Amino acid sequence: MQLRIPGPTPLPEEVLQAMARQMVNHRGPEFAEMIRESTAILKEMFQTKGDVLILTGSGTGGMEAAVVNSLSPGDKVLSVANGVFGERFADIAETFGAEVSRLGFEWGQAVDPDAVRAALSQDTTIKAVLVTHNETSTGVTNDMASIGATIREFDKLLVVDAISGLGAIDLPIDAWGCDIVVTGSQKGWMAPPGLAMVSVGERGWEAHAQAKMPRFYWDLARAKKYLDDRGQTPWTPGLTTIYGLHAGLKLLQQEGFGNIIARHARVGAKAREGVKSLGLSLFADEKHASNTVTAVKVPDGVDVKKLRGVLRDEFDTVLAGGQQSLEGKIFRIGHLGFVTEADMDAVIGALKAALPKAGFKG
């Protein structure tokens, strides 16, 4: 099957085999060796000298951890959003009592750093900025280098949802001034769902020391202490998923980080060019189009539910639909993690055959 949604992503055979292992003691030496090695590889790929912590939970759980470990109720937060997941970040902060100012951009367009600068200039009491690196819902990658530089002008905390970008799209988090960054195992990491990986830099820990939002399971200081002192997690981890992550990280390390980024760039370009060759239109501004997910406008006369059904039932190809206000208006092709250019050729071939069956007259 061509599972081409933005996550969960297909798994290499080595990862599947690793997950079939018998359980080990998560308070024993085998687990300590595995989590320490996994963490070391993650730090290389995060491009950070700070801490990286592996949490059992979804990416959204990691987003909540980032919020509650860095903020207090009543803190002013600027939430920069250009899609579903940017809005989710703001919702989480509001749920825990932050005073959130929402800076929204048209879905399909990238965040404008000048607009971020203007918003921060107008309210000097803002403590932190929440930004989505790669907006899965629209297929847009935001310019985190420029956004990070802008936020540094005002000395604000930068908290980043990099769930569908990190590990596949270059994001040197130390160099670009990202203080707390979240990603998820089921995206670019060639691992199953169930783990959130969170990096915390020096400024992130300074914010943590002052933060008063409630946290227990998501307490990053406790996670750091258990990792540093014992090679453990404070709570029972998703052990099978950690087996898979460890195996996926070893494969990524063998490929080399630069090669991984270049591969995703090639595959992303292949997806976009293939879509356009069929007479379809991209939803995202192509200058900021993602190399991990491509959003495609549904042409007039095409029943997108039927299209996805035909692809699934007749061509063994699974694509994602649109979310919220984009439901029925776009479909999305995921191309991250365990993916090659040949996979995109297969997807485009299936689309070419399926489109006329769903009403496409192009």
Image: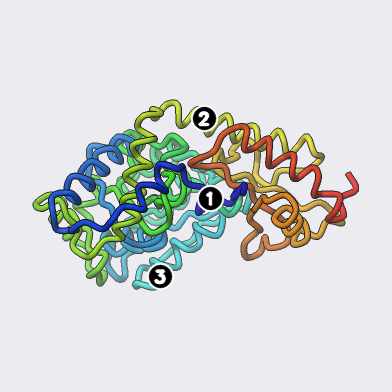
Q: Give the residue drawn at x 58%, y 29%.
A: 266
Residue 301, percent across and down? 87, 56
Is 13 or 49 nearer to us in this picture? 13
Which dot, 2 or 1, sits closer to the camera?
2
Q: Is residue 122 above or below residue 258?
A: below
Marked residue nearer the N-terminal end (2 or 3)? 3
Q: Circle 2: is it few (<14), some (14-19), or many (20+) Cα within 10 Å?
A: many
Which three-letter amino acid code belongs to the residue tagged 3? Glu
Answer whether residue 151 is visible to the viewer in this image.
yes
- Tag of residue 223: none
**70 with respect to 166 (left or right):** left
Q: Quadrant of the C terminus?
A: top right
Q: Which residue is mark 1?
A: 135
Mark 1: secondary structure: strand
Is 204 or 268 nearer to us in this picture? 268
- Tag of residue 263: 2
Q: Is residue 229 above or below residue 92?
A: above
Which three-letter amino acid code belongs to the residue tagged 1? Glu
Q: CA distance from mark 2 to mark 1?
A: 20 Å
Which three-letter amino acid code belongs to the residue tagged 2? Arg
Mark 2: secondary structure: helix
Q: Which residue is mark 3?
A: 94
Q: Give the residue drawn at x 85%, y 53%.
A: 357
Q: CA distance from mark 2 to mark 3?
A: 38 Å
Residue 122, percent across and down? 43, 54
Q: Give the residue drawn at x 14%, y 58%.
A: 27
Report which quarter residue 232 is drawn in. Answer: bottom left
